Image (cartoon, rainbow, N blue to C red):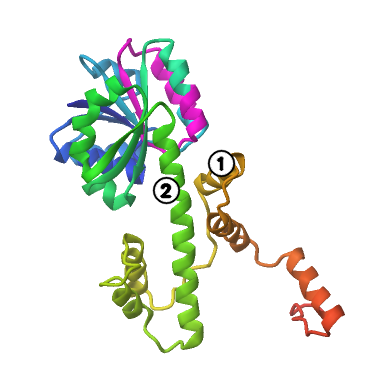
Amino acid sequence: MQIGLIGLGKMGFNLALNFQRNNHDVIAFDLHKSAMERIRESGIQTASSVADLAGRLTGRRVIWIMVPAGNAVDVILGNLKNHLRADDIIIDGGNSHYKDSINRAADLDQNGIHLLDCGTSGSITGALYGISATVGGFKGAFDYCESLFNSIAAADGVMYCGKSGNGHFVKMIHCGIEYGMMQAIAEGIELVNRYNDSIDLASVIKTWNNGSVIKSHLLELTQQVFEKEKNLESIRGVMNSSGEGKWTVETALELGIPAPVITMSLLMRYRSQQTDTLSGKVVAALRREFGGHAVERDAGSK
């Protein structure tokens, strides 16, 4: 299949190579010239602009966009509307909010253009060798692209989820689960290390990931991390978030569904970005007042 690809970040770049390896005719575009040069070195064609990309695709056009959620998606979709025809297909493979995907699909539908929201998972490695894809949107558009999805996905890694927004909704919940799993892994490893810092953490994780009930891809990645650096001394424990966990918690509140593990893992990410907090000072001071507990003094205080 001929396909246009907009966005050559870490995921998009590897997706382009995945498309190429599976014999799709790819034309790529990115605002960053260095990314365009690198993809050309891999034998993939590039376009000079969004308009140029759309103009070079023939027949029923399929364009996959892989850019950060938010305004960047709206700008690209607004641009593409001027260059596409009825029945053309846009696949948003990024982490857009599912409500945005619903609204965008309705807007594009006025021009007869179909938007498929594709929750793309599998990490950078998966983007290269086999993604997991949950897809929402017009069924006829999905049917047209199903062979494309299957060719670049892991075995049984593609699911049509139904109406617009469903694909990104399912991916959002997946990311919320991921938050909780990563936090549990991290806390368990810290407990082992605090109990006895002579225990080799990489070996512990390797053992857990062979035959135990918690074996997983996340543990595989954790093992790789500790094999590279024994106790991660060079890394600060600051955990950033892309927004998917926050959206999951907000959705849980909207639906009245308790999600304490995901919620706490999100709050722990926020906590990691604070070196010292007033709330922590308040609790320490209160414990001193009612229980006579010692407090730790800042090095610069008297």
- Give me the residue at 58% from left, 61% from top: 268
Residue, disc 1:
251
Label 1, residues with CA under 10 Å away: few <14, some 14-19, many ≥20 = some
- Please provide the residue range marked out in magenta: 74-103
Is residue 95 located in the magenta-colored stretch of the structure? yes
Label 2, residues with CA under 10 Å away: few <14, some 14-19, many ≥20 = some
Where's residue 85, x and y in %?
A: 32, 10
Is residue 96 located in the magenta-colored stretch of the structure? yes
Residue, disc 2:
174
- Give me the residue at 45% from left, 38% from top: 169
Where's residue 52, x and y in %?
A: 31, 19
Where's residue 167, x and y in %?
A: 39, 35
Q: Where, quadrant-wise, is the N terminus in this rendering?
A: top left
Give the amino acid type for the residue marked by disc 2 in the picture: His
184 vs 256: above or below: below
Classify residue 97 as left or right of residue 15: right
Q: Is residue 38 visible?
A: no
Q: Tell me the SS state at disc 2.
A: helix
